[in-house]
Amino acid sequence: MEECVFCKIVSKKLPAFILFENESAIAFLNIRPYTKGHSLVIPKKHHRWIWDIPKEEAAQFFELCQKVAKHLQKTSGNELVYSLTVGEEVPHAHFHIIPNDAVSKFPKALDDVIDEVAFSPELHELAGVLDELIEKV
């Protein structure tokens, strides 16, 4: 996909601070980090969602995710490394790997999102509808 910013990083048309890469994936620092070391791992081929990555490529993709996470654990001195996939920011499959940083607001911001969703009346209504559908199956 020519206009995709991540495809442009893969093709080296846009610069990025690349950490690691393999045949199927590339890891680089996020330009809008939540914490120092916040990295992204993307497949080199354009796929909209992580679950769209073919099995053959997915193994190498997740091997690179693991390599980045272990590197961040070692370099940050902190075992806690967050992983997150949302997919709305850029329409190209990507995985956030975010080292814990006691000074950042990332964990608190994530808690706020979880609380907002968990206590959403719409979500509870949807859960009831899904429960009814499951009972019918």
Image (cartoon, rainbow, N blue to C red):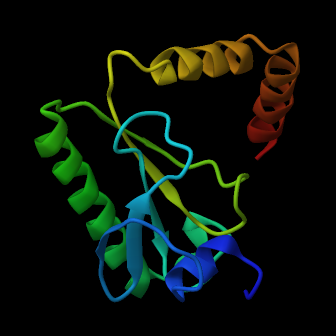
Image quadrant where residue 56 sits: bottom left
Query: Is 104 left or right of 94, judged from the image as shown?
Result: left
Residue sitting at 54 percent across and 77 percent down?
9
- Between 25 and 50, the one lying in front of the other is 25
- Between 132 and 58, the one lying in front of the other is 58
Image quadrant where residue 66 sits: bottom left
Q: Position of residue 54 (x, y in %)?
A: 50, 83
Please determine whether, in this image, residue 89 is positioned above or below residue 41: above
Residue sitting at 77 percent across and 81 percent down?
3
**Rendered-image quadrant of the N terminus:** bottom right
Please determine whether, in this image, residue 12 is positioned above or below residue 134: below
Residue sitting at 73 percent across and 52 percent down?
88
Q: Position of residue 60 (x, y in %)?
A: 32, 77
Residue sitting at 18 percent across and 52 percent down?
71
Query: Is 96 left or right of 123, judged from the image as shown?
Result: left
Please determine whether, in this image, residue 45 is positioned above or below residue 137: below
Q: Position of residue 110 (x, y in %)?
A: 55, 23
Image quadrant where residue 8 sits: bottom right
